[in-house]
Image (cartoon, rainbow, N blue to C red):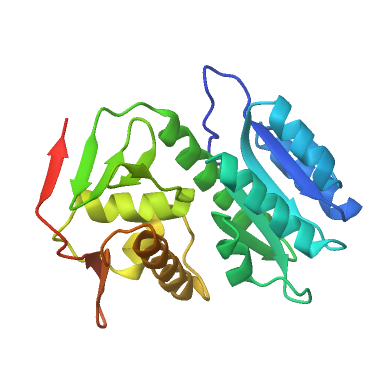
């Protein structure tokens, strides 16, 4: 079993929001076997209270009876935090994978849950969350865009623009390698999403959402699509890396 990252040997806190009791118990037990400390609830209101009071390293959300509340909770947490968010989805429900990612989730696991997939994606998101906490004295600049990796901040013409974890990782990959073309699989690996059915579509969705967000924030057309190959940073200006 893959070792779970910890901070000074302190178990990472996971907030599990699940209104199906049997699934909540099963997921909780799997997370505890992985060495994680789990707080679970079926209430989105209670989940927000727990989140505000505790140092949460990962959030897992599924509300079968209140799907829109699940998306609202995801948006609310994303608006105030970069904590990794993993959504659980079910093809028989009205919430689909694109809606989940658009709400700010970093990844998803489809039901019925395969424990190997759950463990892999939990590990990926926790590792990404921990790496973001590590200070890095590097600033990336491309045209009017500025990415401060140590502060985990992104701005356009000195006005801060909020990006989700996945969007930030995607853009960071391109800004650190401005002339390189990345395939969809390379991008999936960099942003911590497992390859599988529909994963290429997720990359396209992230790219489209990132383009729109930056354009609406006054920035340039940031991502170029290289047909049949992948993506690279658009030629907005000469890059500068500050250390």
Res. 114 in view: no
- Residue at 28% across, 67% down: 223
The percent position of residue 39, horizontal first and vertical second, equals 77, 34
Res. 70 in view: yes
Quarter of the picture containing the N terminus is top right
Numbered circles on residues, count: 0
Q: Can you name the residue that lies furthest to the top here?
A: 8
The percent position of residue 188, horizontal first and vertical second, equals 40, 61
Task: Choose between 39 and 23: the one closer to the eye.
Answer: 39
Task: Choose between 64 and 2: the one closer to the eye.
Answer: 64
Task: Choose between 96 and 198: the one closer to the eye.
Answer: 96
Task: Choose between 220 and 196: the one closer to the eye.
Answer: 220
Relative vertical location of residue 181 with respect to residue 13 in this rendering, above or below: below
The percent position of residue 36, horizontal first and vertical second, equals 67, 32
Q: Can you name the residue that lies furthest to the right here?
A: 21
- Residue at 23% across, 52% down: 175
Quarter of the picture containing the C terminus is top left
Relative vertical location of residue 233 with respect to residue 192 in this rendering, above or below: below
Q: Is residue 150 left or right of residue 36?
A: left
- Residue at 72% across, 25% down: 53
Q: Is residue 80 left or right of residue 65?
A: left
Relative vertical location of residue 145 with respect to residue 92 in this rendering, above or below: above
Dividing the picture into quarters, in which one does residue 109 lie?
Answer: bottom right
- Residue at 75% across, 39% down: 48
Dividing the picture into quarters, in which one does residue 80 lie?
Answer: top right
């Amino acid at each position: 079993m893959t070792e779970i990252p910890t901070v000074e040997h302190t178990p990472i806190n996971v907030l599990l929001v699940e209104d199906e009791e049997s699934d909540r118990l099963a997921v909780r037990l799997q997370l505890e076997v992985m060495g994680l400390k789990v707080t679970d609830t079926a209430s989105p209101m209670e989940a927000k209270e727990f989140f505000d009071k505790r140092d949460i390293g990962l959030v897992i959300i599924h509300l079968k009876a209140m799907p829109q509340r699940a998306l609202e909770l995801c948006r609310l947490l994303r608006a105030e935090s970069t904590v990794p968010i993993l959504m659980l989805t079910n093809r028989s429900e009205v919430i689909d994978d694109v809606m989940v990612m658009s709400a700010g989730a970093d990844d998803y696991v489809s039901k019925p849950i395969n424990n190997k997939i759950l463990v892999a994606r939990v590990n990926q998101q926790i590792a990404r969350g921990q790496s973001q906490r590590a200070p890095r004295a590097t600033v990336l600049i491309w045209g009017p865009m500025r990415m401060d990796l140590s502060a985990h901040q992104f701005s356009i013409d000195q006005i801060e623009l909020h990006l989700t974890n996945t969007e930030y990782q995607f853009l960071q990959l391109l800004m650190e390698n401005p002339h390189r073309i990345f395939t969809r699989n390379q991008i999936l690996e960099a942003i911590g999403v497992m390859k599988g059915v529909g994963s290429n579509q997720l990359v396209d969705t992230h790219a489209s959402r990132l383009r729109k967000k930056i354009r609406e924030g006054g920035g340039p057309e940031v991502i170029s699509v290289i047909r049949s190959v992948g993506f690279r940073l658009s030629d907005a200006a000469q890059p500068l890396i500050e250390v």
